[in-house]
Image (cartoon, rainbow, N blue to C red):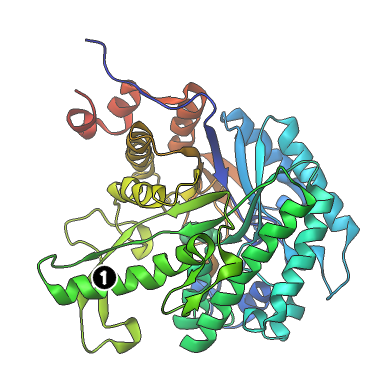
Amino acid sequence: MPEATFHFPTDFRWGTATAAHQVEGNNMNNDWWAWEQEEGRIKEGHRSGLACNWWERAEEDFDRAAELGQNAHRLSVEWSRIEPREGHFDDAALDRYRAILRALRERGIEPMVTLHHFTNPLWLAEMGGWENPRAVFFFERYVARVVEALGEFCDLWCTVNEPNVYVYMGYLAGVFPPGKKDFRAGMRAGRNLMRAHAVAYRRIHALQPGARVGFAHNLRIFDPANPRSPLDRWVAGLQDRSFNEAFLAAPTRGRWLFPLGWGFAWRLRRTLDWIGLNYYTRDLVAFDRHQPGAMFGRNFHAPDAEPLDGGYGELYPDGMERALKRLSYLGLPIYVTENGIPDADDDQRPRAIILHLHRLWRALQGCIPVMGYYHWTLVDNFEWAEGWTLRFGLIELDPETQARRYRPSAHLYRDICKGGAIAPEMIDRYAPDLRPVLLP
Ligand code: IFM
């Protein structure tokens, strides 16, 4: 019997994902740049600085992506460059983005453009950011300008990246700007972000009837620490509803769920052509009455699980298949808009890639419509509050010298992208211990 090879569909999108502030460099006009200048905000006092210098030299990394067999790339555009002052749009910035998208197309790489990925122009932050309902109008106006300028090169749009993470980190944990610990303000901001998604969805379709519009949801798995404990099950369910379900119910069923809101959200109903899955890890959750601020949950990682760098979580590839199955009930095409691990020495990433893609392959066998996979990320980049301490790149970057070095996982991912399959030799080379599990 021939050995199994895990084949993916021939039209599958194989790519990587990035975000403007993390790669462009010198993004000085947004709330994140200001945040980085404040003492104690970013680990080890790191700053985004020149980042990967994509504002000037993205094309060189696109050459690398093409050489690595990638046919898709998810990137974001930076609102504060495009609209540096309220109502004033910068044509030179839009021209640069046109050049960036053209460069991707010339290399046979299909762009997916994210319109909001964590950062806000300073002028918007000064008006109260997403707590201010006017942000929805401002976003719609900005999106219209972007689609008019870039629509020639892109019809695959991601309105908002991880609204749940934005709310959690910015308004509950207080480690992203605006650095608040204010539940009500956070839910207001979350509702406005989801409204902005819906408004953008309609506006993009009005301007570009063939557009495909979705948003990227960070689906974290919350499992009860003790599945037999009703309290652990209740608290894990509560966290899942708050972090996952509430953000999925609004743009699909048109419902505000607690804690995001109550009642109908009619204008948000059916505002997705596809759903993006950003999958990284899972939490075990135990009931703890001393943690009211954490919804009475104590979150931790399975003690026997393989930990990821810097306390990022546990390696839990089964979560990929579970998350895809769950999203499949929405009845929409799914893109894995992000997946990856922080791993500076690349001793876990090759295995992690194989395992996560194997679970994705299994979802495809179950007829779940997964259209593509965007690995996070191509080149090490500025990891928000973690600065440069967490390295997610297939390619290692020295931010001082801008020198790049391919990690072994870049070559593995190249072979998978080029062959459209995980072959037994890859398992033998990068994950020999998995051979008995994955291969007959
Ligand atoms: O770097 C981030 C990205 O901006 C959003 N999703 C998770 C990634 C890794 O933490």
Residue topped by disc 1:
236
Can residue 177 be seen here? The reply is yes
Question: Position of 369 compared to 325: left or right?
Answer: right
Give the quarter of the figure containing the N terminus. Answer: top left
Q: Residues within 10 Å of mark 1 (few under 14, many from 20)?
A: many
* Residue 143 image point, x, y percent: 75, 61
| Residue with the most extreme top position | 1
Task: Look at the numbered disc 1 and say if its residue's Cβ is closer than 8 Å to ligand 1.
Answer: no
Q: Is residue 190 above or below residue 394?
A: below
* Residue 306 image point, x, y percent: 25, 53
Question: Position of 342 compared to 383: left or right?
Answer: left
Out of 405 and 31, give the one closest to the viewer: 31
Give the quarter of the figure containing the C terminus. Answer: top left
> Which quarter of the figure has residue 152?
top right
Can residue 179 be seen here? The reply is no
* Residue 394 image point, x, y percent: 50, 42
Question: Position of 107 compared to 239: left or right?
Answer: right
Q: Residue at x 32, y 32 (%)?
A: 430
Q: Residue at x 54, y 51 (%)?
A: 380
> Which quarter of the figure has residue 92?
bottom right
The amino acid type found where label 1 is placed reads Ala
Out of 119 and 251, give the one closest to the viewer: 251
* Residue 369 image point, x, y percent: 45, 38
So how many labels did they put on this image? Answer: 1
Q: Residue at x 46, y 75 (%)?
A: 168
Q: Residue at x 73, y 69 (%)?
A: 139
In the structure shown, which secondary structural element does the residue marked by tag 1 occupy? Answer: helix
